[in-house]
């Protein structure tokens, strides 16, 4: 078990749990909403086999409420982790909510330690530009009223479970995701919804490294037309790979397609 202290909250240290495997060029995996450091587990074996060092971590507040929850703090946490590891030539790979950390980190902290970036299931550039605010109001309301019901509904939509169950994802895998999601406090989950509404339209043009965006065409939560397809117009460094029929949780339902896209990008 390895941890790094990234700050303090109400007199207690804020520590991030992380896992560090392999050797070679480092790839840092940043989890999505309701996910821990296993967010990108289906890509890990392929990355290790290809000779990369894989670092994954739990976002602050996973399992314990914290305050001051925004992308500036989350990007600073990532900066502290990279400084602790002392690595350069890093590839950042964000999943869903983690794509916000990628965008804000590169815009605020620069790319001196980063050579490439990947966003799997993007949330930039600005969700309120394409998704009505009432949608997020109802999400926060459902978290407050019954977190278990919210988790169930969220995972069903994240995996398009009514369509892909037994084909792209099993009941056991769905249940495993639910167990992990239940570890996240309702306070932090609700805060994640708020930070997900961050406007990244100034961050995206500031990214100065090659950036791959992998997004499913059947994403029900954050549709591709409101997210990934808008990004190349904001930055010529961005390339989008669309995975036909894939949902928001495509890293788990379509792992072969995601791995292929990421490895081709890294080796180019």
Image: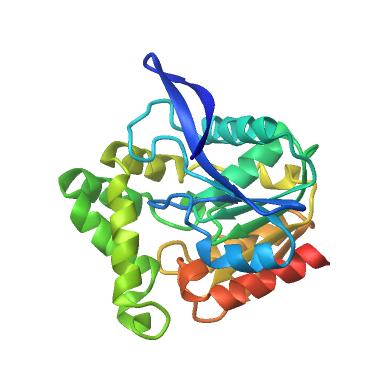
Left/right of residue 218 with respect to residue 176 in the rendered view: right
Q: Position of residue 268 (x, y in %)?
A: 83, 67
Left/right of residue 138 with respect to residue 126 in the rendered view: left
Q: Is residue 143 above or below residue 257?
A: above
Nearer the observer, 16 or 120: 16
Q: Is residue 267 above or below residue 69?
A: below
Nearer the observer, 75 or 84: 84
x 68%, y 47%: residue = 204
As drawn, which residue projects farthest toward the bottom? 167
Instruction: Count all numbered tags in the image, as a single digit.
Output: 0
Left/right of residue 142 with respect to residue 224 in the rendered view: left
Left/right of residue 23 with respect to residue 42 in the rendered view: right
Q: Is residue 10 above or below residue 37?
A: above
As drawn, which residue projects farthest toward the top? 11
Q: Position of residue 192 (x, y in %)?
A: 40, 42
The reply to whether residue 129 is in sight is yes
x 73%, y 67%: residue = 50
Nearer the observer, 108 or 90: 90
The reply to whether residue 201 is in sight is no
Q: Position of residue 55 (x, y in %)?
A: 61, 48
Q: Position of residue 265 (x, y in %)?
A: 75, 66
As drawn, which residue projects farthest toward the left? 145
């Amino acid at each position: 078990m390895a941890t790094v202290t990234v700050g303090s909250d109400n007199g207690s240290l804020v520590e991030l749990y992380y896992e560090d495997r392999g050797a070679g060029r480092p790839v840092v995996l940043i989890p999505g909403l309701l996910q821990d450091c296993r967010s990108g587990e289906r890509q890990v074996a392929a990355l290790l086999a290809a000779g990369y060092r894989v670092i994954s971590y739990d976002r602050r507040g996973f399992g314990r409420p914290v305050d001051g929850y925004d992308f500036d703090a989350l990007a600073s946490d990532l900066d502290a982790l990279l400084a602790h590891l002392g690595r350069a030539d890093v590839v950042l790979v964000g999943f869903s909510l983690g794509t916000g950390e990628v965008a804000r980190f590169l815009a605020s902290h620069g790319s001196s330690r980063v050579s490439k970036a990947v966003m799997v299931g993007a949330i930039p550039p600005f969700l309120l530009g394409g998704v009505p605010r009432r949608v997020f109001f109802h999400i926060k309301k459902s978290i407050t009223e019954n977190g278990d019901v919210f988790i169930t509904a969220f995972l069903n939509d994240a995996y398009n479970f009514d369509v892909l169950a037994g084909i792209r994802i099993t009941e056991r895998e769905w249940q495993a995701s639910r167990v992990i999601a239940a570890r996240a406090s309702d306070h932090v989950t609700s805060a994640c919804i708020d930070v997900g509404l961050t406007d990244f339209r100034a961050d995206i043009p500031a990214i100065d490294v090659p950036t791959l965006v992998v997004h499913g065409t059947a994403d029900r939560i954050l549709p591709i037309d409101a997210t990934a397809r808008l990004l190349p117009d904001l930055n010529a460094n961005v390339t989008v790979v669309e995975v036909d029929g894939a949902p928001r949780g495509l890293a788990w339902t379509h792992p072969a397609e995601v791995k292929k896209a990421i490895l081709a990008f890294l080796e180019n």
